[in-house]
């Protein structure tokens, strides 16, 4: 409970120690964490503050029909080992053949994240033994990945009400193409592991973010924005629950001005909410450990969502030596642009970076800006619209069908509609109230045929999804506003006649 | 320069090879000496080549699902299976530490 985000972490640290504001000394990081909101409470003197450092490694499954190096189908939930080719099972004599669509997905993503696309990138083998890695190595891009040096901008709200948003940026170190591994199901009762290779060889984009973040909230916001970008591009469906987006967090803490502390890697984070929790827990755990005179081990920890804590992971045999070597079966991947386009090459064999760039859809940040400009809504409104699948479309449909100004419509969308959907755990698609019905209702309100209060009552009825129109409900419940002047006078007079004493009191002031 | 016991032990852990005896280690030593002859070549100003395929065109395949659906055939290779899953030990079984295993490397 209490303080959220970075401000929260800092305040807890302050309670342990003395301090000036965080801005005093920022250490070697490109982006420092700012304390937000309110005065920093005075703390005990003697102990110095902590600077948490958070970096993320994100694996996004590429949205494609077939795998990265083989023609097996990519599909969630299929009979075990049915989507596996001889190459995926690493049978001798098989060779990798690169999927063009995966290359395009990585280029699109690199461009959307402001990266430099490497016109020549290389594939390597990363060796380690595990039952779900039949070849004993993973084909990845360790030396020269397909894209480098990008950035991702994301927004955070300073307070709970979303009335003040601040934009932050995290640097993207690189994006690389690599194979996914199969899935291991641990059967502890029979002391065995069941292996399903359906996922083995599926294309992944690993997005490596520099450690520019400082708390769970920042990490969560960055990942959410990345998720929206990937979904907008279509390069990945990025659904965390289906393992299409996996996030590992690297966390460390240090005192301002001192070198970075030992970092731990936190895995097994299954949702954006848990990401924030896992990161914040780990920061607190490390601070606690160090303040008690302990040390941080450079280890891998798993997040336990039930207990809300991180625990050391089993099966870690100390520091791994992956013995990287160039993948001997794949020549360098060459990409072209308008200038370097070869004259007489088969079209299908050419990936043109400029061609892809020209066809990039509007990214979320652009869509938000357009919504704000077009409809006069607030920036924070545009965030909420984009954050909910189908909500923007719903909003725009209502606006099209009503005379009510978008600035007024947005309130009904974000408060009433969205509030109801959230309460009942419904998606926009599942809404019993269509954009048509809502527009109909808002028109009655706009024409002053009903009051705002009455409109809310009608909405409650509409949620029941009984197929009645707003007008029918208004008539049924007699919610029409009285327009007739004479009738209004009669009503007022009747009220005053009944409450003579109160009227006298009011007149006397 | 002789390859140290630490490196040999490390290799045995990583690659699960077994040098077995002095002859095995000697063979490794000779292989390294043979490869080290590369250092005698002056490569100043020459870009490293890591594949003889470097001038070849990397073929790009169309994104069509054309393979798979051979579960039965693949499982023929499995010593043990449960329904249609391959069966493996519960986790990696790492090689015991040098002091704890019976290897000729101990004596070196």
Image (cartoon, coloured by chain):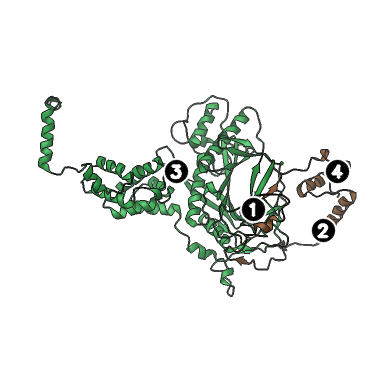
Chain colours: A green, B brown
Mark 3 vs mark 2, CA separation in Å: 57 Å
Near-viewer residue (A103 or A402): A402
Reading the image, the residue beneath label 3 is: A166
* Chain letter of disc 2 in the image: B
Q: x, y (%) of residue A325?
A: 72, 55
Q: Are marks 2 and 4 on the same chain?
A: yes
Q: Residue at x 28, y 41 (%)?
A: A456
Q: Are marks 1 and 3 in contact (CB under 8 Å)?
A: no
Badge 4 marks a residue whose secondary structure is: loop
Question: Is residue A391 in sight in this rendering?
Answer: yes
Q: Residues within 10 Å of mark 4 (few under 14, many from 20)?
A: some
* Quarter of the image where the C terminus of chain A is located: top left
* Chain letter of disc 4 in the image: B
Above or below, comparing residue A423 to residue B52 in the picture: above
Q: Find residue B35 and name its label.
A: 2
The image quarter containing residue B63 is: bottom right
């Amino acid at each position: 409970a209490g303080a959220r985000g970075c401000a929260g972490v800092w305040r807890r640290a302050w309670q342990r120690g003395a301090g000036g504001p965080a801005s005093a000394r920022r250490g070697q990081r490109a982006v420092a964490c700012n304390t937000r909101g309110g005065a920093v409470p005075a703390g005990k003197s003697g102990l110095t503050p902590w600077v948490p450092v958070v970096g993320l490694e994100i694996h996004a499954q590429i949205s494609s029909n077939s795998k990265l190096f083989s023609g097996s189908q990519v599909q969630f939930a299929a009979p075990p080992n049915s989507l596996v080719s001889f190459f995926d099972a690493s049978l001798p004599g098989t060779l990798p053949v690169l999927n063009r669509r995966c290359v395009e997905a990585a280029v699109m993503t690199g461009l959307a994240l402001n990266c430099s696309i490497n016109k020549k990138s290389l594939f390597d083998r990363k060796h380690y033994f595990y039952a779900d890695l039949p070849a004993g190595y993973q084909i990845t891009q360790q030396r020269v990945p397909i894209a480098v040096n990008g950035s991702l901008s994301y927004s955070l709200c300073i307070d709970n009400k979303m009335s003040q948003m601040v934009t932050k940026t995290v640097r993207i170190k690189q994006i690389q193409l690599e194979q996914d591994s199969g899935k291991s199901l641990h059967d502890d009762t029979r002391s065995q592991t069941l292996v399903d290779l359906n996922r083995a060889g599926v294309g992944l984009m690993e997005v490596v973010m520099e450690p520019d973040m400082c708390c769970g909230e920042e990490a969560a916001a960055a990942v959410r924005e990345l998720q929206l970008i990937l979904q907008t591009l279509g390069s990945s469906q990025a659904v965390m629950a289906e393992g299409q987006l996996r996030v590992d967090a690297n966390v460390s803490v240090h005192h301002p001005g001192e070198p970075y502390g030992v970092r731990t890697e936190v895995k097994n984070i299954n949702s954006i909410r848990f990401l924030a929790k896992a990161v914040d827990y780990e920061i607190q755990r490390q601070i606690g450990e160090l303040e008690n005179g302990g040390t941080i081990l450079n280890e891998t920890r798993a997040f336990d969502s039930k207990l809300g804590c991180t625990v050391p992971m089993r099966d870690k045999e100390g520091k791994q030596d992956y013995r990287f070597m160039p993948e001997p079966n794949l020549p360098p991947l060459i990409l072209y642009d308008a200038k370097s386009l070869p004259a007489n090459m088969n079209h299908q064999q050419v990936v043109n970076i400029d061609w892809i760039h020209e066809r990039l859809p509007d990214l979320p940040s652009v869509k938000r800006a357009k919504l704000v400009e077009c409809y006069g809504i607030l920036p924070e409104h545009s965030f909420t619209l984009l954050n909910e699948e189908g909500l923007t479309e719903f909003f725009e449909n209502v606006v099209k069908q009503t005379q009510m100004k978008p600035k007024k419509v947005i309130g009904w969308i974000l408060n009433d509609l969205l509030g109801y959907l959230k309460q009942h755990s419904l998606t926009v698609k599942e809404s019993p109230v269509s954009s048509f019905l809502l527009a109909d209702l808002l028109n009655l309100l706009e024409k002053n045929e009903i009051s705002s209060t009455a409109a809310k009552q009608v909405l409650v009825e509409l949620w029941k999804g009984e197929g009645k129109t707003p007008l029918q409900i208004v008539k049924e419940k007699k919610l029409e506003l009285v327009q007739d002047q004479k009738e209004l006078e009669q009503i007022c007079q009747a009220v005053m006649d009944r409450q003579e004493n109160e009227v006298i009191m009011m007149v006397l002031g | 320069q002789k390859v140290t016991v630490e490196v040999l032990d490390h290799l045995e852990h990583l690659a699960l090879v077994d040098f077995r005896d002095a002859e095995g280690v000697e063979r490794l030593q000779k292989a390294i000496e043979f490869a080290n002859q590369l250092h005698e070549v002056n490569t100043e100003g020459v870009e490293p080549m890591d594949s003889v395929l470097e001038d070849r065109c990397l073929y790009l395949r169309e994104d069509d699902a054309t393979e798979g659906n051979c579960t039965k055939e693949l499982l023929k290779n499995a010593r043990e299976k449960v329904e249609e899953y391959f069966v493996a030990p519960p986790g990696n079984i790492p090689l015991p530490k040098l002091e704890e295993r019976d290897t000729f490397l101990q004596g070196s």
